[in-house]
Amino acid sequence: MKMNDLYDLSHTLAAEYLAGFSYPWQALSGIKELIRELGPKLGGEYSEIAPEVWVHSTAKVAPTAYLGAPCIIGPGTEVRHCAFVRGSV
């Protein structure tokens, strides 16, 4: 199955980037750079809570969760107690 069969790209800020690949795993090598590019442009609903870690105002992040840079936590996301979110997500 190809990218367009698996995902509706109209729901992501990475649509233009992802559309350039046939298979999802092909996009992995450039995710870190994409996050670093998108993060500063996210706007007022996002806060940079640590260097290169952006969290949407509607996201819930437990104080015991680890968010590794770079990462973007999107709208409505819940990151629970002791979660480990490594960089490039």
Image (cartoon, rainbow, N blue to C red):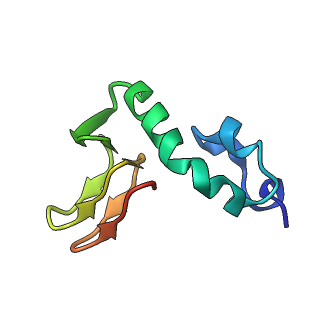
Question: 17 or 30: nearer the eye?
Answer: 30
Query: Which residue is situated farthest in the bottom direction here?
Result: 82
The C terminus appears in which quarter of the rendering? bottom left
Residue at left offset 69%, top offset 46%: 18
Residue 29 picture location, percent across and down: 60, 54
Residue at left offset 62%, top offset 44%: 11
Residue at left offset 48%, top offset 32%: 37
To which quarter of the image does residue 19 belong?
A: top right
To which quarter of the image does residue 45 belong?
A: top left
Query: Which residue is situated farthest in the left direction here?
Result: 63
Residue at left offset 78%, top offset 56%: 3
Q: Is residue 65 above or below residue 89?
A: below
Asked whether, in this view, residue 29 is left or right of residue 36, the answer is right
Q: Is residue 86 above or below residue 71?
A: below
Question: 29 or 70: nearer the eye?
Answer: 29
Q: Is residue 4 above or below residue 62?
A: above
Query: Which residue is situated farthest in the front direction here?
Result: 29
The N terminus appears in which quarter of the rendering? bottom right
Asked whether, in this view, residue 62 is left or right of residue 8, the answer is left
Residue 61 picture location, percent across and down: 25, 58
